[in-house]
Image (tube, rainbow, N blue to C red):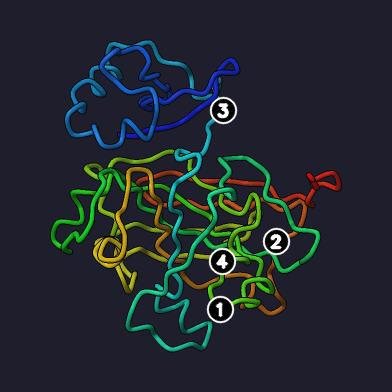
Amino acid sequence: MKLARFRHQDKVQTGVIANEQVYPTSQDPALPTDMLALLPALEDLSHNLQVLTEKGQGIPLADVQLLAPIAQPEKFLGVGLNYADHIEETGLDTPEFPTIFNKQSSCVIGPDDAIHRPRVSEKLDYEGELALVIGKECRHVPYDQAHKVIAGYTIVNDVSVRDWQIKAPTWTLGKSFDTHGPMGPWIVTADAIDPHNLELKTWVNNELRQHSNTEHLIFDCYKLVETLSTVCTLKPGDVIATGTCSGVGVKMKPRGYMKPGDTVTIKIEGIGQLSNPVVEEPEDNARF
């Protein structure tokens, strides 16, 4: 099942997607109209959601604007060095423990929204990634139970400003510029997908830059949930981007950084595709 946030006739709604239509949850009084309220209730409301796609009134996908499925996650976490081929291209050692960093939630944008190349750097890079979305508040989740707290999966472009990434060892600055968290196009529920056997591809314009499979994750989705929930309470809507494979722009010769006029597209099997244009940061972007 695909869950989406969308705008239709200037109204932001939550819905279920089926047969190229989106069915607003507002059509069933038993269904939450907010994504963060819907995620913890998926198991109990699965029948209602299914009936909605069969008997509800759908809106053609072509008539709506898809938004980031989670507007401002309380936690937006990323994982570095989580594919063997990416580690090889960086020349770094394979980590014995997940490398975790924060992306500030203000960086989130949706499908087709513009990625800004910041005025302070031209070293703007893409990272196509599978992301998991937490569905239940949880803590100290063992590996074999982790699947129960994941609501579903989406696509994230972990846009990175490489020179700012290395300014501080936490990486957070270079990962958190406004517009540098494209997410979408929707959430595919966990019961509909095997997160550890999905083909992943990233294109810049028509050039295929990344091609791998999530079976090559060093620390898989369940291990990440186990590790992170040992440290902090995970809450519905928290997003964990699982890391990128080889083919990033910084390791190309010459460098393959994104530039204004480019379009970056990430496709993950079983989920769909996320596409965003690149533009210069607007001159009037300062606010104070």
Front position among marks 3 and 4? 4
Distance between the alpha carbons at the discs numbered 4 and 2: 20 Å
Between discs 4 and 2, the one toward the N terminus: 4
Relative image position of residue 204 (x, y in whole percent): 63, 57
Image quadrant where one finds the N terminus: top left
- Residue 19 locus on image (x, y percent): 37, 24
Residue under pointer 3: 65
Tell me the crowding category of disc 2: few under 14, some 14 to 19, or many 20 or more residues within 10 angstroms, Cα based: many
Badge 1: residue crowd in 10 Å (few <14, some 14–19, many ≥20): few
Residues under labels 1 and 2: Cα distance? 23 Å
Local secondary structure at mark 4: helix
Nearer to us in this view, 254 or 232: 232
Q: Which residue is mark 2?
A: 258
Kind of element beneath mark 2: loop
Question: Which comes sooner in the sequence, label 3 or label 1?
Answer: 3
The mark closer to the camera, 4 or 2, is 4
Name the residue beneath numbered marker 4. 172
* Mark 1, secondary structure of its residue: loop
